[in-house]
Image (cartoon, coloured by chain):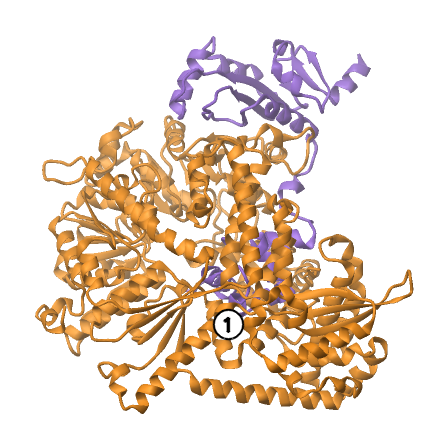
Amino acid sequence: HDRHSIRRKPRFQNMVQFHEHIITELLEDSNGGLVVTSSGLGLHKLISSLFLLHHQSQGCLLVLSATPPQKSSILRNYENDIQSQFSGEVPNLPSEITSDLTANQRLSLYTSGGIFFITTRILIVDLLTHRLPTTAVAGLVILNAHSLSDTSTEAFIVRILRSTNRSLYVRAFSDRPHSMVSGFAKAERTLKCLFVRKLHLWPRFQVYVSQDLERDPPEVVDIRVPMSTYMIGIQKAVIEVMDACLKEMRKTNKVDVEDLTVENGLFKSFDEIVKRQLDPIWHTLGKRTKQLVSDLKTLRKLLDYLVRYDAVTYLKYLDSLRASESFRSVWIFAESSYKIFEYAKKRVYHFGRTDSGKLGLSKTVSTKKRKLNDNKKDEVAQQCRAVKHDVVPLVFVCLKDQSTSTETRVVLEEVLEEPPKWKVLLDVLMEIQEERDKHALSGEEKYYLGDGDDNGIVLVACKDEYSCMQLEDCITNGSQKVMREEWEKYLLSKVQLQALPKRNAKKAKEPKGFGVLDGVVASAPGKKAEVSSISKQEHDALLAAASEVSKRINKDIVGKDDNQKHVDGGGSVKGKGKGKKKKGSAGEKANNDVAPEDDAMEGGCLNEVFLRKHNQALDAESSREMKKLPPVVFYALESDKKILDILKPSTIIAYHPDIAFVREVEMYKAENPSRKAKVYFLFYEDSTEVQKFEASVRRENGAFESLIRQKSLMMIPVDQDGRCLGLDSSNEPQSVVPQNLITRKAGGRREAEKEMQVIVDMREFMSTLPNVLHQKGMRIIPVTLEVGDYILSPLICVERKSISDLFGSFASGRLYHQVEMMSRYYRIPVLLIEFSQDKSFSFQSASEIGDDVTPNNIISKLSLLVLHFPRLCIIWSRSLHATAEIFASLKSNQDEPDEVKAIRVGVPSEEGVVENDVSLIIFVLTPLFRRAENYNTSAVEMLRRLPGVTDSNYRGIMDGCKSLAELAMLPMERLAELMGGQMAAKMLREFLDAKYPTLL
Amino acid sequence: STPSSSANRNAILVSNRQKGNPLLKHISNVKWTFADIVCDYLLGPNTCALYLRLVTKLDLVDDFVKIYICLRYHLLHPDYLYFRIRELQKNFRLRIILCHVDVAVPGNHRKLLNFFSLEECGRYLETVKVYENKPADLIQGQMDGDYLSRLNHALTAIRHVNKTDVVTLGSTFGSLSHVMDASMEDLARCPGIGERKVKRLYDAFHEPFKREV
C-alpha cells in the first residue's frame, strides 16, 4: 500500500489492492465472468486497468452499455495510467465506434485490434450483416450488467459471437447489487445469457475491501442539522399521506404486504416492486389503485425535494404538481395533504388580513428593530411558529371590498425560510478557513498542505446541478439574496412572462411592458373561478406583489424616468403601503439603513438611492465573505463524473449524503494514503434523508447476502470444455423451425435457402424481438425500411406496436399513415399488437369500457381503422415469444421476402415516381429515416406533434431548419415557405408563442 | 317489406344461428334484429362479422401453436372457420372475425379483432355499426384539443417528460418557443427536472433533426 510496493508492479500503479484481487480472480476463467461490487468502489478504474492488459494481437476489445459519464471516466483513468507507464508516446487510445463511420471504416477498426466503445445496435447489425468477422473480437466488456436480460441485445450479441468464436471472453460488471437481486434468480439468468460461469461478489464488507479502505480512513465529521418546524411538519404530513396510501394499497389485497413499508417507499426500486406484482393483473385494477401507485411515486419525490430544494422552489414544485394532478390524484385530497401545501406556503410567505393599517405598520417597526438586532436567519427558521414577528413585510395591498365598501388591508408577508443547511455550510466553510489561517500563522503551512501538491480545495458534493448553482450563489452573494431572487422568480412565474426581460431585454425596454403586466393583474381575477385552494384576496395580493417585482425589474433597466412615472401612476391608489413594498423588494439589507419613518417621505429618487446603496453594501459584504472562504468547488453527484481524482480536494463536504460517494471518498483516501482528507457530512436530523442513507447501506448488504446465497445454489450447465452452455440449453423451447441450429454454425450458408428469413427494420433493433426471432432460428436481415417494421414474405408486411405505442400513434395519426402505406404496397398488411410478457393481455378492465360508444376509446379507434382499411389484419400477441411463433406460422406457406425489393418500397426514386405505387403519388421530398441512427428521434417526434405540422410538410421543415430551437425563432414568412402554406404556419407560430396560462 | 328494410339499415342483422348467444345482451347502443343471413352479424352493406368462441381448459395456452390446436379440438368441425369464410364468398369488403377468448390465460389469434369479454365484443360490433360512414379524422391525428393538452402531447414526445414537468416548463418559460430556446442552466433550475432530463430536453431542442454524416 505504500508507494514503493506498488511501484514494483508498474502496470497497476496507484491501485488499491482489492482491485488487483478482483482482476486476478476474473482472469482465472478464460471465459470471463460477472463482477458485482458495492457502489462507488471504482469500477471505472478496474475496467481501465483491464484495458492495460489488452494487446492488439489478441483482437479487438469491445465495450458495451457504458453510459457517457462512465465512458469518460474510464477513458480519463486509462490515459492517466498509460501516461505514467509509457512517458511520452501514447499507444492508441480506446475510441468510439459510431454510426457516423462508414461500414469500411468500421471494418478496419474492428480488425485493428484496438479497444472500442460501441452501441449494441451498431454491433448487432454489423454482426448480422457479417460486416464484423466474429474472430476479430477478443472479448467483450459489458457494463451495467444489472440491466441485462435474456432478451436484451447484449445477450443476442454474445450468443452470436460465442457460436463461432470459442476463445471469446465476456467480462460483465455491475455496481448495483440490489438490482441484481430483483426478479427470480436474476444473477443466474444473467450469467447464462452471457455464457459465463463465474460470479464474483465484492461487497464493501468483503475482507480485502474493508482492509484496504479502513487502513487509513479519512477523518469524518458528522453534522446533524435540525430541520425547521415547518420542514418537520411537511415531512410528517408527507409520511402520513404515504402511509395512508400504503394502507389503501394493502386493502386491495393485490400486493404482498411485507414490501409495503414507508422505508421501502423511499427508494425508486419501490415502484418496481409494486409494478412487478401488479403488472399481470393491471387491467383488473380500478383507476384508484392505479392512481395510488403513481401517487406513491409523487410522494417520494416530495420527501426528496423537501431536503433538496429551498422553500420557494419547493412551493413552486407543489404548485406545478397541483396544476397537473389535481383531478386524478388520490393523495391530494387526503387530509394531511392540506398541511403539506399550507406549511410549504408558510415557509415562503404569510398571508393575513387586518382591519386597520396601523396594526400592520406597528408590526413592521418592531420587526425591523428585531432585524437590526439579530440578523440570523436560522433563528428565524427555529421560531417559525411565531412567524408574524420574525418577518419583514413585503407587500401591503389595499383592496376595496366592493360589497361593504369598507377598506380591508391585506398583508402579504414575506417569510422566505432558508434551508437550515445553507447556514451550516457557510459556517463549516468559515471554520475550515479559520483553521487554515491559524495554521498559516503558526507557520505550519505543511500541516494542511500535506505532501506539497495540495491545493486546499474544498469540494461540496450535492445531489444535483441545481443545488450546486444555488449554493455557489449563496456563498458569493449571500443566502438572503438567493432566496429573494427565487421569490421574485416565483412571483414572476405567476404572471404572464411574455414581456418580461428574463430572456430578452429588448422587449422590456418598451414601455408596453407595463401595460401588459397591468393588464394581467386586472384580468386575472376572471380566471379565479378555477382555483379553490387559494383565496381570491391572497391571489390578488400575490399578483400585486408580482407586478411590483416586475415593475422594479423594468425600472432597473429603463432607468430613473420610468421610475418616476411609475410612482406617479401607482402612488395615489395604493397609498402608504406602496413605499413599504418597494423597500421590501429592494432587499432586507436596505431596511437596516432606512428608518421606518421614511415611509412618509415617498419618492422615487430616494428609493433609487437606497436601492443602489443596498447593492453596494451587499457587494462589499459578499467580497468580504469571499476572502474568508477557502476555494470551493461544487460537484453534482448526478453528473457521475469522477471528480475526486482530478481535483484532489483536501476537504470534502457531503451536502447531500450518498452512499456511493462515501465509498468514492474512501477509495480516494486509500489510493492517496499520504494525503489528508477530512469529510463533513451534513444530515438533517431525524429526516428521511438520514433514514434513506442508512437504509441504502442495509439494502446493499441484504442484496449481497442474497447474492452469496444464490451463488452457492446456482446451477450453471457447462460443456466438456467447461464453457457455460447458456440459457437455452436447460429449457430451450421446441423450435418451430427444424433448421434452428444453422445460425449457430454460421457456416451453414449453403442451406440458407431453406432457412426462414425475416427482413427487419434497423430501428427495431432497439427492441428485443429480433433477438427472439433469431433464437427461434430465423435469419435476420437488418435493413432500413421505409414501410413496415418486419417483412415476412413478398406479401406480408408487419407493423409492430406495443400497447403504449399504439395509443400514442393513434393520437398522432401516425398509425393511420403507416397502415395506409402498408396497404398501398403489400397484399397483406398486418398490424401486430404486442403485449409484454408480464403484463395482462387486455387493454382495459370491464369497468373502463363504459356504457356508450365514445370516440376516445381504443375500441372506437381500432374499429375505425378496420373500417377504413378492410384488408388490414390485426394480430394480437401475448408476448415476444408468441410473436415469434406467429411469424413462423405466418411464413409457413409463403415465399421468402426479397431484401432488395423491400428496401426500395416506399422510397421515392430519382424521377420522383415510386415503383409499384398504385396511386402514383409523387414524392418530391427526401425520405425520412434512410439511416435512422442519424436522426434526432425525440426532436422529430416532437416536431410531428406540433399543430400545423403534417406528414406532408415535416420533412420540408427539417430540411429548412436545423433544430427545434431554430424553429422557435423562425418568422411567419419563413415558416409559411417551409410548411407550404400560410394557414399551417400561422397555426404553428401561434402555438409556439402562445402564453402559458398562469398557475393562479 | 319496405319499412322493415329501412329500419334494418340502421340495425345490426343477427343470424338466427346466434340465438341464445349471451353476447347479444351486450349490444345495447344499436338496434339489432334476427335475420336469415350467411354471416353471423351483418354490420353494413359491405361489412360482416363471424363469431368465434374459443374455449380452452388448458392453463398453458400462451402461444399460437397451442391455440391453434385448441381451435381444432374444441370446435366441432376443424374446418369450421374455413367453410364459414368460403361461404361469405366475395360479397363483403370488410370481414371481421370476432374471436372471443374465454379463458383466464388468454392466447392470440390471427385475423382482425380479438376480445376478452362479451362487453368488449358487443362494443366492437356496436362501434363498427355506428362508425359505418364516419371519416377517419379521429385517427388521423388532427387533434384540436385545448392548448394545454397539445402542449402536453408535444413535450411528452421527449422520453421521461411527464405532465408535471410540462407545467413547470410552461410556467417557468412562459411559452413553448421560450422553452425550446432555454439554456441548459435555465432548464436545470426547474424543480423536478434532473440532470438527465435536462440533457434530454436540451438535446431534443438543440441537436439538429438530421445529423450530417
Residue depicted at x 54% and y 89% = A620
Residue depicted at x 47% and y 76% = A472
Chain ID for label 1?
A: A
Give x and y (percent) for residue A326: 65, 49
Residue under pointer 1: A470
Choose top left, top right, bottom left or bottom right for residue A794: top left
Q: How many marks?
A: 1
Question: Front-most of A66 and A632?
Answer: A632
Image colour for chain B is purple
Q: Secondary structure at mark 1?
A: helix
Side of A665 relative to A802 (left or right): left
Amino acid, disc 1: Gln
Residue depicted at x 51% and y 19% = B102
Instruction: Write down which chain is painted orange.
Output: A
**Crowdedness near tag 1: few (<14), some (14–19) or many (≥20) residues, C-alpha within 10 Å:** some
Question: Front-most of A20 and A513?
Answer: A20
Choose top left, top right, bottom left or bottom right for residue A739: top left
Question: Front-most of A800 and A890?
Answer: A800
Quarter of the picture holding the C terminus of chain A: bottom right
Side of B76 relative to A109 (left or right): right
Side of A124 relative to A317 (left or right): left
Choose top left, top right, bottom left or bottom right for residue A401: bottom right
Give x and y (percent) for residue A60: 19, 58
